[in-house]
Image (tube, helix red, strand yellow):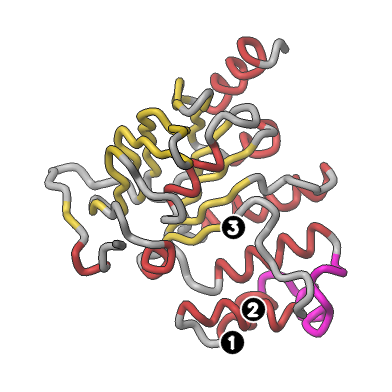
Amino acid sequence: MNAPVTDLVDVPGDEPAPLLELVDVRASYGPIEVLHGVNLALQPGSVVALLGPNGGGKTTTLRVCSGVLPVEHGELRVAGRVVNGVDAAALARLGVCTIPEGRGIFPNLTVRENLWVATGTGVSLKDLEAVAYERFPILGKRRGQLAGSMSGGEQQMLALSRALGTDPTVLLLDELSMGLAPRIVTEMYDIVGRLVDDGLSILVAEQFARAVLPIATSAALMLQGRVVRVGDPADIEHELSTSYLGG
């Protein structure tokens, strides 16, 4: 049974707590354990790049952080409070918003209808549209267009707009670069960097390290369900390419 938000447990301590933290987290799909004691922290105003090859556990880690996949052992914490068992909708109300792999938009709905779907979080369509069209004017021109007929970059803008309209504190991004041309990937990560300047903290899982490292404040290397290294983005990039990708 999912725990109500009012039953969250505060973790005592003198230091300011990370906005999002995994402490010795284990998680499984059925009988198969996929995360084997993951430790990871997202500090306020930071971008943590979660790097590693496919199958390493990056997407599973984000699914745990978003409340989609339960913690079987260890703790998931939001601003110092243990939120094990809290579902995705409750975590969204706590300010944790996710853009999943593949963007998570509805291709057979218009831009405006996609934004309307996000009103389930309690934000009005008017406010969602204001945020979307101010940050991405092209979406205002496309408001009546089916989302699936737009370019990949425009679809990613729509996904970001739905997330930003809920005024999150933490943004979880899974493979932002998927299906996008390199130039568009660079533009999208420039936008993500500006979101951090506006006060967001971001955990981004990305297979292509060079896409996200220019805006990352720290990086974590994930292999076979474990975070094996956390450190400076440049150091992690070097280790990733030389030790694990044969660069």
Q: Where is residue 119, by image quadrant?
A: bottom right
What's the residue type where badge 3 is placed?
Answer: Ile
Give x and y (percent) for residue 87.
38, 62
- Along the line of sight, the residue nearer the viewer: 49 or 38: 38
Q: Amino acid at mark 2?
A: Leu
Please give the label number shown on residue 99.
3
For disc 2, the marked residue is 115
Q: Could you classify mark 1 by the number of other residues whose Cα lies within 10 Å: few (under 14), some (14-19), or many (20 or more)?
A: some
Q: Are marks 2 and 1 in contact (CB under 8 Å)?
A: yes
In the displayed structure image, the side of residue 228 where residue 125 appears, left or right: right
Across and down, in percent, residue 240 comes to 61, 19
Circle 1: residue type: Leu
Dot placed on the residue nearer the N-terminal end, 2 or 3: 3
Q: Tell me the magenta residue range.
A: 134-150
Judged from the image, the secondary structure of the residue bearing numbered disc 3 is strand
Left or right: 110 in relation to 103: right
| Mark 2 vs 1, N-terminal side | 2
| Extreme-front residue of the structure | 31
Q: Is residue 38 positioned above or below 65 on the image?
A: above
**Callout 3 environment at 10 Å: few (<14), some (14 to 19), or many (20+)?**
many
Q: Which residue matches tag 1? A: 125
Q: Which element is circle 1 on?
A: helix
